[in-house]
Image: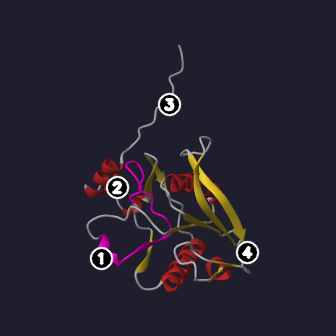
Amino acid sequence: MAEMPVQHRRWTRAEYDRLVEIDVLGPDDKIELLGGYMIVREPKAPPRAATISRVSRVLGDAFGDGWHARTFAPLALDDDSEPEPAVYVVTGDPMDYVDAHPSNAALIVEASLVRVAFDREHKGSLYARAGIADYWLVNIPERRLEVYREPMTDAASPFGWRYGRGISAGADQTISPLAAPSVQISVADLVG
């Protein structure tokens, strides 16, 4: 008898949102939708939670009026993805998003303690596919900031896209967000 292949059930963002709406999925489930698959988010261990709070504060201060930094809030990227990045920066006021989640961001930051490779490869590919121009990854174990820019197609990447340019910055360096090029952010303020 031939072995039956494992099948996967892909979900749309509308189906996922409906599961949240009817309380099948709730905040304690720690799930996000990536490319049609429900993925368990990385736990908020103390070093990661502290990093996320620090990054949110630094970015809120750096971008200033007319922008705000959201933490662990859904981002409606496309029909099959609704990730909840650690921090992302969008234009406007929080009340601008009462009726719908943002669908784009000026900057996305993931803070990784135990899923650095996953956030680099999978989430990076997803964000590149969505056209996010500026993706930062706080690599907590190495105390480094990885900055990814220039989305481009790449059939070998998990979601068919990747970033064409990536740099790794240490605590002694500074970085400027693409959406706020006159702002200099100390990497030390982000990585601790």
Of the numbered discs 3 and 1, the one sitting upstream in the chain is 3
Residue at 64% of width from left, 60% of height from top? Answer: 116
Graded by Cα atoms within 10 Å as few (under 14), some (14 to 19) or many (20 or more), the crowding at tag 4 reads: some
| Coloring basis for residues | secondary structure
Mark 2 = which residue?
25
The mark lying in front, picked from 4 and 3, is 4
Label 4, label 3: how far apart the Cα atoms are: 43 Å
- Does residue 142 appear in the picture of this structure? no
Q: Earlier in the sequence, mark 2 or mark 4?
A: 2
Amino acid type, mark 2? Leu
Q: Quadrant of residue 28?
A: bottom left
Magenta segment boundaries in residue numbering: 76-97
- In the structure shown, which secondary structural element does the residue marked by tag 1 occupy? helix
How far is disc 3 from disc 1 in space, using C-alphas? 43 Å
Question: Relative to 166, does residue 179 appear above or below in the rendering?
Answer: below
Q: Is residue 45 left or right of residue 72?
A: right
